[in-house]
Amino acid sequence: MPVTAVVGGHWGDEGKGKVVDALAARADLVIRYNGGNNAGHTIVGERGTLRLHQVPSGICHAGVECIVGPGVVVNPAALFDELDMLEAAGISSARLRISDRAHLVFPFHVEVDETVEVARGPKAHGTTRRGIWPVYAEKAARTGIRAGDLLEPAFLQERLGEVSRRATALLGRTVTAGELWYLCEEWSDRLLPHIADTHPLVQAALRRDDAILLEGQLGVMRDLDWGAYPYVTSSTCLAGGACAGAGIPPQRISRVIGVVKAYTTAVGAGPMPTELVDGLGARLRELGQEYGASTGRPRRCGWFDGVAARFAAEVSGFTDLAVMKLDVLDGFDTVKICVAYRDGPRVLASVPHTAAMMRVEPVYEDLPGWRETSDARTVDELPDAARAFLERIEEVAGVPVSMVGVGQEREALIEIRDLGLGNRDSKPMPPASSDRSPVPSP
């Protein structure tokens, strides 16, 4: 069976959760490989509307095993809220494993994030203020605390001394090792049943040739290396990042599904060449209910950015495109696709350095609109103009469209090409361990 990576093709919020939710029905294992609770995946199904921020979207399917990989940063308090939501919806979290190599988000990380973002003033990056970049900064500085540290009290106690001194220096107030230890002790009872060395589990799934889905957060335009730096996230959003963030050898990834909307949205600051700051942008926002799943912030909206989609496809190796929310464009007389950027006398066919991208103007192609797509369940049922729009996206992005979303419901997803996941033959995941005990009091 193939390993399939699901990657955002724009600025995030493209509908990756819906795609993973649909594909997970035929998968054995879903692995979240980057980010934290700074973005959310919304799933609408028979159990209502669920907004997942850290738990992989495959959790909604019985028998699908789910892993939070070492590339993810885990906020335990937010995770517990998410698990409570799932339990209230009748969904078991017993199939969830958290890599012992995943880093933990402490409250002081959130405080650092908020303090620095306020200090940026008018140059704020528009972060979610969830403490994500401070944790990744500590990870790079080799001073972070990982989930597996909760299993080693003596090691943890030694590490917390260094962490508390760093937090004190950053915040200008005293952060004690004791208060951090108390948090770890408080988290342990609920976290420990889920913490595992996920490497053997992933390798066993590969040997069995299981169908594996790799679930990414945000999109290529927010990637730390290839996005519009510094208006980016602090992890790697590309399919290549899934190799490190999930522990999957690159040659095992056989399909990369880039997820885009039929228009473009972004949350936070930074360049967005196709943004519409007029009534059209507001219309897209209301029709698509474009408000952040994590923060509730209104998203910036604009026409489809084909330049960014092609760039994302090239650097992340998309084999397929999933175009979501096509129905939001129902009723527009004309729809537009950005096919190039204009920077003064230059016409650019690729995404430039951030400084140039902030001043470019979009070069649009106008296409005829259509009336109704939301009732379509096959590609042949789509209006001719909607099919022509999708075909032009394929040409501009250089990637075939394999899935089309025409509504919030699970069944409102048209699969144009067989994505080759096969039929799921679920296999139980072994317990995390039989000899793990909570962090004791010091």
Image (tube, helix red, strand yellow):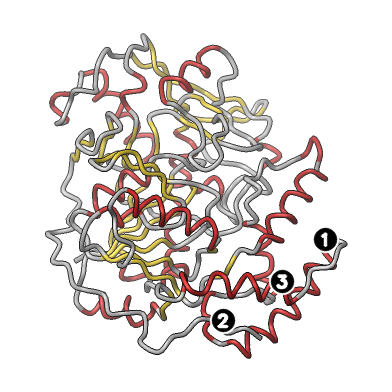
Give x and y (percent) for residue 267: 57, 36
Amino acid marked by disc 3:
Glu
Using the image as rendered, state which of residue 108 and residue 125 is in the foreground: 108
Give x and y (percent) for residue 411: 19, 36
Instruction: Report, in whole angstroms, how far the alpha carbon at label 1 lies from the one at label 3.
Output: 15 Å
- For image coordinates 65% across by 26% down, the residue present is 345
Which one is closest to the eye, mark 1 or mark 3? 3
Query: Dot 3 lies on which element?
Result: helix
- Dot 2 and dot 1 residues touching (CB under 8 Å): no
Image quadrant containing the N terminus: bottom left
Q: What residue is disc 3 on?
A: 179
- For image coordinates 40% across by 89% down, the residue present is 435
Q: Kindly identify which numbered label has been placed on residue 171.
A: 1
Looking at the image, the residue that sits furthest to the top is 333
Please report whichever mark, 1 or 3, sits nearer to the chain's N-terminal start.
1
Amino acid marked by disc 2:
Asp
Query: Dot 2 lies on which element?
Result: helix
Is the residue 413 above or below the residue 337 in the image?
below
- Dot 3 and dot 2 residues touching (CB under 8 Å): no
Image quadrant containing the C terminus: bottom right
Give x and y (percent) for residue 335: 39, 17
Using the image as rendered, state which of residue 269 and residue 396 is in the foreground: 269
Mark 3 nearby-residue class (10 Å; few <14, some 14–19, many ≥20)? few
Amino acid marked by disc 1:
Leu
Mark 1 nearby-residue class (10 Å; few <14, some 14–19, many ≥20)? some
Instruction: Report, in whole angstroms, how far the alpha carbon at label 2 lies from the one at label 1.
Output: 24 Å
Q: What residue is disc 2 on?
A: 149
Left or right of 243 on screen, residue 350: right
Give x and y (percent) for residue 398: 35, 41
Query: Dot 1 lies on which element?
Result: helix
